Image (cartoon, rainbow, N blue to C red):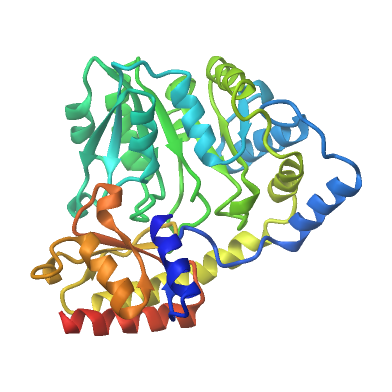
Amino acid sequence: MAMTQLARDLRAQGRDIIGLSSGESDFDTPAHIGDAAAKAIADGKTRYTAVDGIPELKEAIVEKFQRENGLPYSTAEINVSPGGKPVIFNALAVTLNPSDEVIIPAPCWVSYPGMVSLLGAKPVIVPCGVDSGFRLTAEALEAAITPKTKWLMLNSPSNPTGSAYSREDLAALAVVLRRHPDILVLCDDIYEHLVYDGFQFTTLASVAPDLKGRVLTMNGVSKAYAMTGWRIGYAGGPDWLIKAMAKYMGQTTSNPASISQWAALEALSGSQDFIAKARKAYAARRKDVVKAINSIDGLSCREPEGAFYAFFDCREVLGGRLASDTDFTTALLEDSGVALVPGSAFHAPGFVRLSYAADPKLLKEACARLNTFCKSL
């Protein structure tokens, strides 16, 4: 967010800035979803709703989980919140005590450790390098667990790396979790539909149904349907946790926007054609961007399984005035007008995140500027 705002400020000063720092689709929200929102307004559906979601949307979420993930939930096990972040924060808020620990594989989304720290608990960052595909291994999970461990956070496909866990990866983690029955697991599946080259997405509760009673499977409409500004996240989980989250929402945010809920209902239950169209476009951009980055001396990038990020290693070009990845991205923005995000923000120093959810022409120009910049170092 900070890099995106800095890019806006420079653009407002007249600079030619290519912003690839934001995790946001460049596509517009599909028209049929906007039409559903307009109809909701015309029908007067603009009043307070149930705190954690209208019944119609909860039913659609139940159907989605069954249809796409093979997960059976009742509406009493469904939470709808004003965005994906509140789903995660509310779940942590109603379960964490100050002495608790939360295992977070890194590179990780910046907000996971921040949320845990805000609640007075301890984020336990477990580095997961390129050799493991930026994925948590069973051995690393076992080594990180202590008697104070309350949660494990899993994000697949990942922000910032785009790495995704296979069925075999999750099954191996499940073996460890069965030995520690008091640990809860939060599966952040927000990029579920953005996977490429035939990768088969799956989630922990599907792979290990016996663990479902302590897994919160979180998702939302922002990435799959280009609805970031609509602010709707949702989750399926054990009823005791869902009830506690609703109680917490009753004293904080109250319900998500009513209009956004009706739009989300149409997104989940209406035509799904947009997803395939967007995925095809992202897949082509991914290949072009990764190829371009890997052709630049001193940079290397693993081809990700999903999401819309290229997470590249810039350590070979650091030195002199560029002592860190933060120096790299700052200088790149100031000198070449390309806004990216330093890996340090994701607990991965020496790496940089580039969002390819942008026009292909802009991506091509950004990669050319990146190449010129690196040659100048």
Compared to 283, does 143 lie above or below? above
Residue pictured at 36% horizontal, 36% vertical: 114
Residue pictured at 44% horizontal, 57% vertical: 307
Of residues 282 and 169, the one nearer the viewer is 282
In the picture as drawn, the residue positioned furthest to the left comes out as 320
Which percent across, then down, holds residue 27?
60, 67
Residue pictured at 76% horizontal, 57% vertical: 34
Which percent across, then down, holds residue 143?
17, 28
Quarter of the image with the C terminus is: bottom left
Of residues 331 and 60, the one nearer the viewer is 331
Of residues 213 and 255, the one nearer the viewer is 255
Can residue 228 be seen?
yes
Can residue 356 be seen?
no
Which percent across, then down, holds residue 29?
67, 60
Answer with the quarter of the image where residue 136 lies: top left
Which percent across, then down, holds residue 368?
33, 84
Left or right side of 295 for 287? right
Compared to 150, does 137 lie above or below? below
Compared to 353, does 216 lie above or below? above
Answer with the quarter of the image where residue 127 lies: top left
